[in-house]
Amino acid sequence: MPTEDVDLPPGALELLALKVLVREPMHGYAIVRAIQERGAERLRIEEGTLYPALHRMERRGWLSAEWGASESNRRAKFYRITPTGRARLRTQESAWRRVSDAVGRVIGSAKAKEA
Amino acid sequence: MLTVLERLGIFARAPDSRPRAAITADIDAELAFHLDESARELEEAGLAPDAARAEARRRFGDTEQVRRECARTQMGERFMVQRLHFLLTGLLIAVVGFLWLGTRRAQVEIEAHRSANQELMNRLAAEAGRLAAMSSALSLEPGARPALGAGHYQAPDGSTMDLASAAERWRERFGQSDAWRHGLRIADQLVILPESQGVEILAACWPALVVAHREQALKPFVFHGGHPFALEALDLGLRDEAASVRERALGYLMTYAWRDLSVGDGAADAWMAEWREKPLAEVVGANARRWVRELGDLVASYDLVPADLMERQLAIVDKVRIETLDTLGVDLARSLREAGVCEQLPKTLGLCDSATRSRAEKVVAWCSPR
C-alpha cells in the first residue's frame, strides 16, 4: 500500500470544512486539525488555503463567524455552519459520493481487465 | 433551486462596510493565531522554537498570498457595490440634471408667456379704463353726474399732482410735435384718465394748443358713445377762436343734440346751457326722441311731406353717430316704430331729392333692431 501524500481535489476542502463544522463551531486552526484527525493526514493540505475558502463560504452565507476566546485563551475567529451551509453540505456530499463511485467503478473495471 | 438562489445572492452576507484597515487587521490576527498555535504544538512535540516557527510557516504556505485572497474576498464585493453605487449616483445626477434643464426651459417659456400676458393685461386695463370712463355716465342715476375737480391729476408718466402741474406736463407732451396725429394720440391718453381729469387737463392746456391739435383733441371724447364729460370738451371747441375747431365741435354736437345748432346765433349756447349738466344717455335719449317725434308728426301730417321740410328734418341723419345710441342704451328703433315713422316715411317722400331719399332709407334701416 503506497503511503505518499496526495493533493486535495478542488472543492474538497470546502466540503471537509463544512463537514467538521457540523459538530461544533471552530476556529481555522481547529478545523485543519479536525480534518487531519479524521483520517486525512495523507491529504496534502496547505493549511493557509483553508482561510480564503472559509472567507468565501462566510460571504456566501454558508458560514457565520464571530470572534471569541480560544482554548489557550487567545482571541480567535470562530466559524459556525448556517442552515444554508448544511443544505449545501448535503448536496456536495451527495455529488462527491456519485463522482467517487463512478471514478471507483471505472478504476475497478480497468484493474479487472489488467488482471 | 438552492444553487439558483445562491447565485442570485439571496443568502450572501452584506459587504463588510468597515474601513479597509479594520478588515486587514482582522485577517492578520486570524492568520497570526493559526501560525502561533501551529508553532506552539510543534514546540510541544519537541521542536526548537525557531524550527517550530519555520515548520508552521512551511505547512501554512504563502502567508502573503493567503492574506491577499482573504482581503479580496472580503472587499471585492464591496468594490463592486461601490462601483454600482457610483454608476447609479452618476445616472441619478444625469437624470436630475436632465429634469432640471427641462424644468428650467419650461420656466423660461412660462416667463415669456407671463410677460406677454402682462403686456396684454396692461393694454386691456388701459382699454377698460377708457371704456369705464366713457360709460360711467350710464351707471349714474338720471340727473346725477360725477363731480368735477377730482383733486389729484395724473401726469403723462402716471404720477399724480395738482392740476396746474399736471397740465404743464401735458402741455409739454402736446408741444413735442405740431402734427395733428400727435395731438390725437395725446388726447387718446387724456380721455382714459379717471373722473373729469381728462377734460379738466384738456381745458387747462387748451389755450396753448395749436389749431391742428385743438381740431383733433375733441374726437376721442365723443368716440364710443362719448366721455361722461364729452359736452364739457365740446364746449371748449364751441368757444374756440378758430372757425375750423368750432365747426368740428358743432358737428360732433349733433350726435348728442340731434339737430343742427350752427343755424342761428346762440343756438348752441342755449342748447348747451340746457343739457350740459345732464348725463349723456339722458341727453341723447331725450334729443333723439324729440327728433323722432318731429319726424313722426311730419309723416302723420302730410300725405306727401313738402320737400324742404323733409330735407331739413333729415339733414342730421348723416351727421349723427348712430352707434352712440347703442352704447348709451337708447332704443331708437322702438321710438321710430312707436312714432309710425318706419311705415309712413317711405310713402310720404313725394318730391324729395335723391340725397333726402337716401337719408330716409337710412332711417328706415334704423327701424330694424341691431
Image: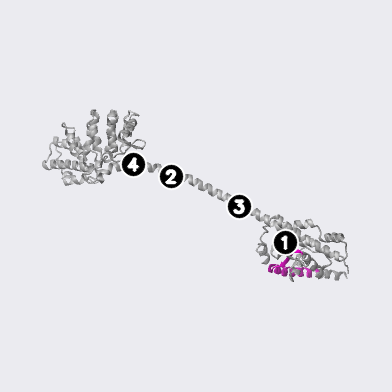
> Mark 3 — residue?
B89
Instruction: Mark 1 vs mark 3: tell me if same chain.
Output: no
Q: CA distance from mark 1 to mark 3?
A: 29 Å
Q: Position of residue B170 (x, y in %)?
A: 33, 33
**Residue situated in front as seen by the camera: B261 or B53:** B53
Marking on residue B114: 2
Residue position marked by numbered label 4 in the rendering:
B127
Pointer 1: what residue?
A56
- As helix, strand or loop, the secondary structure at mark 3 comes to helix
Where residue B8 sits: x, y (%)?
65, 62
Chain letter behind tag 3: B
Q: Earlier in the sequence, mark 3 or mark 4?
A: 3
- Residue A115: horizontal and vertical position, in percent? 88, 71
| Frontmost residue, A3 versus B23 | B23
Please provide the residue range marked out in magenta: A74-103
Image marks 4 and 1: residues in contact by CB distance under 8 Å:
no
Closer to the N terminus: mark 4 or mark 2? 2
